[in-house]
Image (cartoon, helix red, strand yellow):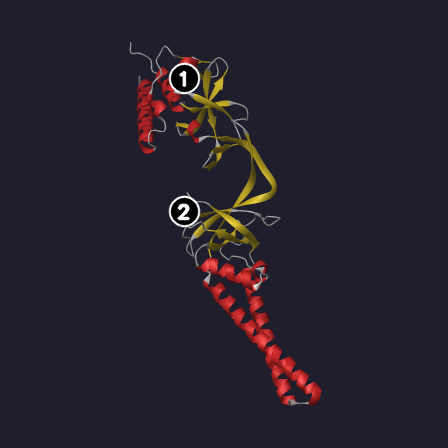
């Protein structure tokens, strides 16, 4: 009796969840509202306890039940790194200092060359003037070199090696919030042999809008809080405001490593007893519920590497109806 009431309560919860789902998603699962008549569905069990639901093709069409074949999917193995968006103001100031230092060097170099030529020809300038011009030139060259070393040590060799025009465009995009630079570190003990060619960035508060990296560089320093391998990730923000200091997660692919599995559509998954399930189509218009363990949730569905294999057909519309029918069959009539 107690078990019967537990099943009744479960059925009520499933029905309530179905109603809430239809309300939230604008009736995308309207097929769930059409119950299967007792004569259309035949429920049976095998010795292992698996429940099989047999439904004639005509009844399947009537309730809108559809199936789809799962195809193989290969996804790169990814490492999750953590960090934050950098403030572009220091880079903007340093770039301005570099522009000023380069202009000063160009001027002092021109003056030094002029003084050297005049002194060599007829000593039209004094030795003192020549030495002053040389000192100014050497000082400006050392100052520019110091700024370049600061740029490399703070922002990495890749940004330091940009020409002035490319770096100015980058600074403009960063200040204008069209792009952002995130500094991320993989957990201590994890080491990537190569720089990832791409990365996906998730900013705190923007979890539904992942961002793609335009470039990934080795970070020139180690974050003392994480003590892991660091990277600078240049991100195109796609008109999403990502302010400096925002915490981010970065998914960095591991070179040469991949996982093989299938992508299960979201509409195929039902939740019962705290687990995720799908209904596999068998021969003879039969269906059986199979547990899955999602490895990753994406906009396309659930990436699964176990329990669901390529080539099997699964219910992608009507799965909730099958679950309700299965639970209903467990209720025995009162004596």
At 55% from the left and 62% from the top, the residue drawn is 165
**Percent x, y of residue 304:** 51, 32
**Percent x, y of residue 246:** 42, 53
Q: Nearer the viewer, mark 2 or mark 1?
A: 1
Q: Tag 1's secondary structure? A: helix
Q: CA distance from mark 2 to mark 1?
A: 40 Å
Quadrant of res 132: bottom right
Residue 61 is tagged as 1
In the rendered view, would you say 68 is above or below 78?
above
- In which quadrant is the N terminus drawn? top left
Quadrant of res 10: top left
Label 2 belongs to which residue? 206
For the question of whether residue 137 can be seen, the reply is no
User: Does 302 sit left or right of 124 as displayed?
Assistant: left
Q: Check disc 2: other Cα within 10 Å, few if <14, some if 14-19, many if 20+.
A: some
**Percent x, y of residue 295:** 50, 35
In the rendered view, would you say 253 is above or below 165?
above
């Amino acid at each position: 009796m107690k078990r019967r009431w537990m099943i009744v309560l479960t059925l009520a919860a499933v029905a309530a969840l179905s109603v809430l789902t239809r309300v939230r998603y604008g009736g995308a699962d309207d097929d769930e509202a059409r119950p299967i008549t007792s004569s259309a569905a035949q429920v049976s069990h095998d010795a292992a306890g698996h429940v099989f639901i047999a439904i004639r093709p005509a009844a399947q069409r009537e309730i809108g039940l559809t199936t789809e074949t799962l195809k193989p999917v290969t996804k790169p193995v990814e490492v999750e790194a953590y960090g934050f968006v950098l403030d572009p103001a220091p880079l903007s100031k340093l770039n301005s200092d570099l522009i000023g230092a380069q202009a000063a060097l160009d001027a002092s170099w021109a003056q030094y060359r002029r003084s050297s030529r005049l002194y060599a020809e007829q000593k039209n300038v004094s030795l003192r003037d020549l030495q002053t011009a040389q000192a100014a030139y050497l000082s400006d060259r050392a100052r520019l070199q110091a700024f370049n070393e600061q740029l490399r040590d703070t922002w990495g060799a890749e940004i330091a090696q940009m020409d002035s025009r490319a770096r100015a465009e980058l600074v403009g995009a960063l200040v204008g919030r069209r792009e952002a630079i995130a500094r991320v570190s993989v957990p201590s003990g994890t080491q990537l042999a190569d720089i990832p060619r791409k990365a996906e960035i998730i900013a705190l508060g923007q979890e539904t809008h992942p961002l793609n990296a335009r470039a990934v560089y080795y970070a020139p320093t180690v974050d003392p809080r994480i003590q892991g391998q660091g990277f600078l990730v240049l991100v195109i923000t796609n008109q999403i405001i990502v302010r400096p200091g925002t915490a981010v997660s970065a998914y960095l692919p591991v070179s040469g490593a991949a996982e093989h599995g299938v992508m299960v559509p979201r509409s195929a998954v039902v939740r019962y007893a705290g687990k995720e399930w799908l209904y596999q189509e068998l021969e003879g218009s039969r269906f059986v519920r199979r547990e899955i363990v999602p490895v990753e949730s994406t906009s396309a569905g659930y990436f699964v590497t176990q329990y669901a294999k390529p080539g099997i057909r699964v219910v992608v519309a009507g799965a909730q109806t099958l679950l309700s029918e299965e639970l209903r069959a467990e209720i025995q009539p009162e004596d």
